[in-house]
Amino acid sequence: MRRVFRRGPWENLATVLIAAGVFMLMQPFSMWLYGWSFAVVLTGTLGYIIVSHFPE
């Protein structure tokens, strides 16, 4: 179980979520993407905070 909760891969996933949310916020094509951008950025940020407490 300890192997599943390693910091590296989860930090990468949280960082990708944050980047996707920022992209969704700045794109001019879809109002639906813009509407969900805050939730995606917030999820990525909270995930990053939680994952930062996982072991190396």
Image (cartoon, grey):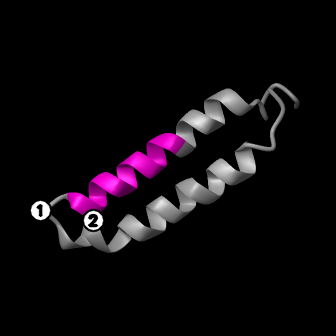
Numbered circle sitting on residue 50: none
Q: Which residue is mark 1?
A: 29
Q: What crowding class fits label 2: few (fewer than 14 Cα within 10 Å), some (14-19), or many (20 or more)?
A: some
Q: Quadrant of the C terminus?
A: top right
Q: Position of residue 29 (x, y in %)?
A: 11, 62
Left or right of residue 41: residue 14: right
Left or right of residue 37: residue 12: right
Q: Secondary structure at mark 2?
A: helix
Furthest residue to the left? Answer: 29
Q: Secondary structure at mark 1?
A: loop
Q: Nearer the viewer, residue 29 or 26?
A: 26
Q: Quarter-wise, where is residue 30 in the image?
A: bottom left
Q: Nearer the viewer, residue 18 or 3?
A: 18
Q: What crowding class fits label 1: few (fewer than 14 Cα within 10 Å), some (14-19), or many (20 or more)?
A: few
Q: Position of residue 27 (x, y in %)?
A: 18, 58
Q: Magenta stretch mostly in which secondary structure?
A: helix
Q: Which residues are magenta?
A: 15-26
Query: Which amino acid lies under the numbered mark 2 shown in the image of this protein?
Result: Leu
Q: Quarter-wise, where is residue 8 in the image?
A: top right
Judge whether 4 appears above or below 42 on screen.
Answer: above
State the residue at coordinates (72%, 32%). 7
Judge whether 45 appears above or below 53 on screen.
Answer: below
State the residue at coordinates (55%, 34%). 12
Query: Which amino acid lies under the numbered mark 1 shown in the image of this protein?
Result: Phe
Q: Which residue is mark 2?
A: 33
Q: Position of residue 36 (x, y in %)?
A: 37, 69
Residues tagged 2 and 1 counted as in contact (Cβ below 8 A): yes
